[in-house]
Amino acid sequence: MFIQTQTTPNPATLKFLPGQDVSPVTPYEFVSESEAAASPLAAALFGINGVSNVFLGSDFVAITKTDDADWAVLKPQALAAIMDHFVSGAPILVDAGSPPPSDEADDTVYDGETAEIVAEIKELIATRVRPAVANDGGDIVFRRFDVGTGVVHLSMRGACSGCPSSTATLKNGVENLLKHYVPEVTAVEATI
């Protein structure tokens, strides 16, 4: 098995590409060792000293290190853990029916014209924004739309969470795109 690595715009995050599906249907982010218990792969990676975040994308694993960790030490250990996981045939998630807490979806129900606006926002995010963000080892998630102010609240995950350029991505990229296609959108804000 050959695993490729790619840098991301976030210097604390490295993207690992095992050459096969990782989490093709739903991306998952693990921000603590206790959350990682839901995934044998994430748990193995959190067992490495210096790992602070594990993001499982469709065909990649993005690992964020702590400030004091060094990629020269961390990278070979991460490669070994990822390879061991895939060779073992273990599942990505222990119980796919219960996603980690950080992946909880917005449960707001929108009606009428607002529902149409939200559907259009979600479609734009899914087709135009998420693929670009995934190339950088991250993900973007719709959280809510405030119809009174026109503000769209989004969460950045994986390599994009805490990335120095994530604010620019949201304001210059996502906000401009959404405002262009959905006139009701006035701004985009990051939500944790």
Image (cartoon, rainbow, N blue to C red):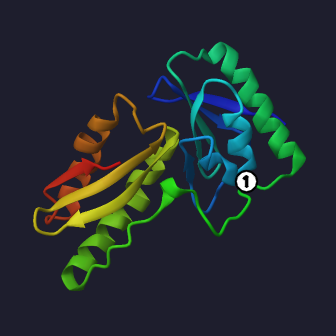
Residue 133 drawn above or below residue 166 = below
Q: Residue 140, how many percent across, how many down?
A: 41, 51
Front residue of this view, candidates 20 and 156? 156
- Residue 2 in the image: above or below residue 175: above
Residue 136 image point, x, y percent: 49, 37
- In-image side of 140 versus 20 (left or right): left
Farthest-out residue, left: 148
Secondary structure beneath dot 1 equals loop
Residue at image position (50%, 46%) is 134
- Whether residue 62 sits left or right of residue 158 in the image: it is right
Left or right side of 132 for 95: right
Q: Nearer the viewer, residue 16 or 110?
A: 110
Place of residue 58 in the rendered image (x, y in percent of width and height, measured from the top left): 61, 52
Q: Is residue 22 visible?
A: no
Residue ID for mark 1: 92
Q: Which of these two is toward me, 177 or 10?
A: 10
Three-letter amino acid code of the residue under disc 1: Ile
